[in-house]
Amino acid sequence: MPDLLLIEPAHLDLWFYPALTCVAVLSGFIDAVAGGGGLVMMPVLLSTPLPPHVVLGTNKIQSMCGTSMATWRYHKAGLFSFRKNAATAAIVFVGAMAGSLAIQHLSADVLKLVVPVLLIAVALYTVLSPGMTDEDRKGRLSERGYMPVGAGVAFYDGFFGPGAGQFFATTLVGLRGMGLTRATGLTKFLNVTSNIASVIVFSIGGQAMWILGACMGVGAMTGAWIGSHYATKFGAKVIRPLLVVVSIGLTVRLVWGWFS
């Protein structure tokens, strides 16, 4: 494998910067409400002259910015506690770092085949489960019992990424018994933790454009601020349908990419 530290900075025409920043606003909004902002951002980034590994690293920077804003907004609304979920976040950090390291050594082809199946399952669970509301119920797993699940989602987020927000949210509802809005708030905290871990790994490997990522990050934070405001105001009646739409849309996108 070539030494990733020797990759030279990629070149983009200047007009890409404001254009991608505008796209990041929409991506940040979707990601703050239901997760899956990569459904918007990744295809656009992949259409640029950037190499795929640089696309992954740069996308993690803007995603980190957007999820940071959403995390702050949800925490301010009282939907989760940093202290009570610190242990889970630490496990998530390690899982995401392991996934980001693994993608540099392994092929993602098999995972691309499995992910659409998982996303279809998420969409069906969201539509059919009576538990996808704002009411808390008895969880099947404690916080400690959920840690391996969180680590697995985080590994996937570092390794591949699309749909990680849905996986966090639906497992927190189905396994921890959280109401959907509260689960969405904690999802953003876990998501930003995994993003930070991935950004560290990709940056060390020279696989991220920080100026472009920062520009998109401003857009993502703007979209996340708007999205988290709507989610906390309207709750499950906004989050649930958007979660279904994003899950199905991302599934179609991945299936199309696989067979094409």
Image (cartoon, rainbow, N blue to C red):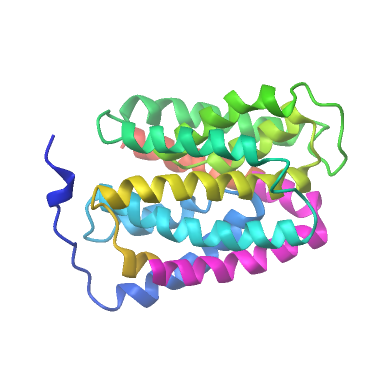
Q: Please provide the residue range marked out in magenta.
A: 214-243
Q: Position of residue 166 (x, y in %)?
A: 60, 40
| 236 in magenta | yes
Quadrant that contains the N terminus = top left
Left or right: residue 200 versus residue 227 is: left
Left or right: residue 53 versus residue 89 is: left
Q: Position of residue 175 (x, y in %)?
A: 73, 26
Quadrant that contains the C terminus = top left
Q: Position of residue 85 (x, y in %)?
A: 68, 40
The answer to whether residue 180 is above or below residue 215 is above
Q: Nearer the viewer, residue 232 or 39?
A: 232
The answer to whether residue 21 is above or below residue 242 is below
Residue shown at 77%/46% (left/top)? 182
Residue shown at 72%/56% (left/top)? 75
Residue 107 seen in this snapshot: yes
Q: Nearer the viewer, residue 38 or 224?
A: 224
Q: Position of residue 221 (x, y in %)?
A: 55, 67
Residue 125's quadrant in the figure?
Answer: top right
The answer to whether residue 60 is above or below residue 114 is below
Magenta stretch, main secondary structure class: helix
The answer to whether residue 69 is above or below residue 197 is below
| 27 in magenta | no
Count the marks: how many?
Answer: 0
Left or right: residue 34 versus residue 198 is: right
Residue shown at 42%/39% (left/top)? 158
Residue 160 seen in this snapshot: no
